[in-house]
């Protein structure tokens, strides 16, 4: 009996040990089935622990365990750590496990590749990254990645994004900030309402956790994930960047400190370059005209290399260095342009922004190190001008969809101000097409087309002038008018009017066998060069709001000349659609028996709409698609 009990005890202990070992190695079978449904990957455990040892001393530890279920889940894995002169990596490792929790790969810090975080410029040689590039051989697999770093830059405390993306479920994620010296801590919760997040924070320490969060499925035309998914902003009122200590309680104070921090010898230029730019603007009194000349000078002299705000530090490379080497990142080029403008007596301000095609705001009510890009602000009697200093070709005062219509922090000598960049709304994003189209008896078509683009539609096409002739023709045939088989481009003339910010195209084209021809009729699609057949995906039960990110207007006019031997009998009636999402109208006008005009106006309005509106929007686009394919039949005399 005693032997049986001992054997039972041994088996029980073995079972417990085995179970514990399996859990530590995260076999896939232990994931609750509710978390694998529709998931490409599962965060098994993501623990962030931050300790503020002093105003200029912070330790950040992160342990992330992620099980990748399929090929699409690979993008959620990042085994990398950035460092520079201000940030020292103190721990780094990664372990890879198979579906059963068996270790298949082990990486210590010495196994990580160590490369420059910035290519194309030696000015940023202290910014580096250590990473592992793991190629999976089977699925599922699990990665356990651990890192720790120490930094003196407490001005940027990592945020918490417990639900990082669509099709990613969360078994457990936690965020802790330990604050033994009891600095004043600020937090801001975003989009927490729809998620079960536990908050056990105290006055000086921060503690949040989430568990068993199912997948959020992506839906077309949904808002940006950062507008839907939860995240936490954290900051302290006493802070340091690169050993420069600051203190603030609002954007004004923070902006004033950062303005002083940015100057710090970075706004110095040689007398020779100052004299050169002053000669360029000699005799000109209008500050905006001066700014245009200086901006063109900067564009012609420099090139851009990509260094994201934060990766290459937060302080720009000194203006003298940028002038010497002729390149810089957004921080360096913006600071350089500002310093050139200072030399000719034009006031301008360094401004930090969240850049990207999707609009993201600097938080108006939470000051701190935000943004990933820098632009330049020129005050202009309430009609501010904004300069993108990283492009050699963008027009003066034009931003485009990379930085338009969002809150930005402007640093002035008096303090920080949150302003908003200009919005390119709906009908200001205009495309006008006018074409003369000759239909041939054999079904071929020839056309002379004139296209004018403004606003974001200008932004979409202005790069055409940098394409070779071969690339340009390929773009027209494969991207712009890919729905027209047998299209041939005979001639192209482009004009990029940067003063008016208008892009103009004149083309001569032919399309063989465009019409279907037989003895009884001649059948052709009337919308030859501006067909918009987009129909949103159908959802039986929509979960997310509808977002139309960009509004625009298309105005299209074709003058058709019928082939010899054919006459026009009747034309289609006018078609009009009017909804909260926009309008659509096509009209036909008979000029004579062999000539008619086709005119289309289409306006789409940006905005965020309730999920219940999605079906109506889809029906609107379906109707448009139907009319975009409208065909006319003409008959022989």
Image (cartoon, rainbow, N blue to C red):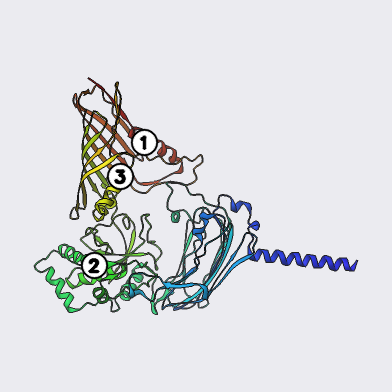
Secondary structure of the residue carrying numbered label 1: helix
Question: Is the residue marked by circle 3 packed among few (<14), some (14-19), or many (20+) residues within 10 Å?
Answer: some
Residue 177 in view of the camera: no
Q: CA distance from mark 3 to mark 1?
A: 21 Å
Q: Identify the residue at image location x=22%, y=23%.
A: 566
Residue 625: assigned label: 1
Residue 138 horizontal/vertical position (percent)? 58, 58
Q: Position of residue 23 (x, y in %)?
A: 66, 63
Residue 261's image quarter?
bottom left
Which residue was labeled with disc 3? 477
Task: Return the residue nearer the eye: 221 or 460.
Answer: 460
Of callouts 1 and 2, which one flags the residue occurring earlier in the amino acid sequence? 2
Residue 470 visible in the current orientation: yes
Residue at position x 24%, y 49% from top?
Answer: 454
Q: Position of residue 255 (x, y in %)?
A: 33, 70
Quickly name the residue at label 2: 348
Work out whether mark 3 precedes mark 2 in sequence or the reverse, and give the earlier one: 2
Closest to the camera, between mark 3 and mark 2, is 3
Give the vertical position of 520 relative to 513 (above or below).
above
Q: Which mark is residue 163?
A: none
Residue 604, relative to residue 169: is it above or below? above
User: What element does badge 3 sit on?
Assistant: helix
Image-quadrant location for residue 29: bottom right
SS category of the residue bearing label 2? loop
């Amino acid at each position: 009996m005693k032997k049986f009990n001992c054997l039972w005890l041994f088996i029980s202990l073995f079972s417990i040990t085995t179970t514990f070992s399996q859990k530590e190695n995260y076999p896939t079978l232990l994931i609750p089935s509710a978390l694998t449904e529709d998931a490409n990957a599962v965060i098994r455990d993501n623990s962030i622990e931050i300790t503020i040892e002093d105003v200029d001393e912070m330790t950040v530890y992160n342990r992330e365990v992620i099980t990748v279920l399929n090929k699409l889940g690979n993008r959620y894995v990042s085994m990398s750590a950035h460092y520079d002169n201000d940030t020292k990596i103190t721990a780094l490792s990664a372990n890879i496990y198979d579906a059963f929790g068996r270790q298949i790969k082990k990486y210590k810090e010495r196994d990580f590749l160590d490369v420059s975080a910035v290519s194309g410029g030696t000015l940023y040689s202290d910014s580096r990254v250590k990473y592992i590039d793991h190629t999976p051989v089977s699925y599922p697999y699990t990665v356990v990645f651990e890192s720790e770093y120490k930094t003196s830059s407490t001005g940027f405390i990592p945020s918490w994004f417990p639900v990082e993306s669509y099709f990613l479920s969360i078994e457990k994620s936690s965020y802790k900030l330990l604050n033994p010296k009891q600095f004043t801590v600020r937090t801001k919760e975003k989009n927490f309402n729809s998620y079960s997040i536990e908050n056990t924070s105290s006055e000086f320490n921060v503690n949040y956790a989430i568990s068993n969060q199912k997948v959020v499925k992506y839906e077309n035309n949904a808002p940006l994930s950062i507008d839907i998914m939860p995240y936490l902003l954290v900051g302290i009122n006493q802070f340091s960047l690169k050993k420069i200590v600051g203190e603030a309680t609002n954007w004004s104070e923070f902006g004033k400190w950062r303005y002083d921090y940015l100057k710090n010898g970075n706004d110095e230029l040689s007398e020779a370059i100052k004299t050169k730019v002053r000669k360029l603007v000699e005799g000109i009194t209008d500050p905006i005209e001066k700014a245009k000349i200086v901006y063109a000078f900067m564009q012609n002299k420099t090139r851009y290399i990509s260094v994201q705000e934060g990766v290459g530090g937060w302080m720009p490379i000194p203006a003298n260095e940028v002038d010497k080497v002729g390149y810089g990142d957004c921080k360096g080029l913006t600071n350089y342009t500002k310093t050139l403008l200072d030399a000719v007596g034009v006031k301008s301000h360094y401004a930090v922004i969240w850049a990207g095609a999707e609009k993201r705001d600097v938080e108006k009510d939470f000051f701190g190190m935000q943004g990933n890009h820098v632009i330049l602000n020129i005050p202009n009697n309430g009609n501010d001008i904004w300069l993108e200093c990283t492009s050699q070709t963008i027009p003066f005062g034009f931003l485009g969809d990379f930085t338009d219509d969002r809150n930005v922090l402007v640093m002035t000598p008096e303090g920080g101000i949150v302003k908003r960049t200009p919005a390119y709304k709906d009908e200001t994003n205009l495309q006008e097409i006018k074409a003369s189209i000759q239909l041939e008896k054999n079904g071929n078509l020839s056309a002379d087309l004139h296209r004018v683009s403004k606003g974001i539609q200008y932004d979409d096409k202005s790069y055409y002038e940098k394409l070779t002739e071969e690339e340009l023709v390929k773009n027209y045939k494969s991207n712009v008018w890919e729905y027209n088989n047998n299209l041939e481009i005979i001639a192209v003339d482009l004009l990029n009017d940067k003063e008016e910010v208008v892009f103009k195209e004149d083309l001569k084209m032919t399309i063989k066998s465009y019409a279907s021809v037989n003895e009884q009729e001649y059948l052709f699609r009337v919308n030859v060069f501006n067909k918009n057949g987009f129909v949103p995906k159908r959802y039986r039960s929509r979960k997310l709001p509808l977002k139309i990110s960009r509004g625009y207007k298309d105005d299209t006019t074709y003058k058709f000349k019928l082939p010899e031997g054919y006459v026009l009998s009747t034309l289609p009636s006018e078609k009009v659609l009017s909804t909260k999402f926009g309008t659509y109208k096509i009209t036909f006008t008979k000029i004579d028996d062999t000539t008619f005009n086709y005119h289309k106006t289409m306006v789409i309005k940006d905005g965020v709409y309730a999920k219940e509106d999605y079906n109506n929007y889809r029906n609107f686009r379906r109707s448009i698609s139907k009319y975009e394919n409208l065909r006319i039949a003409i008959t022989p005399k």
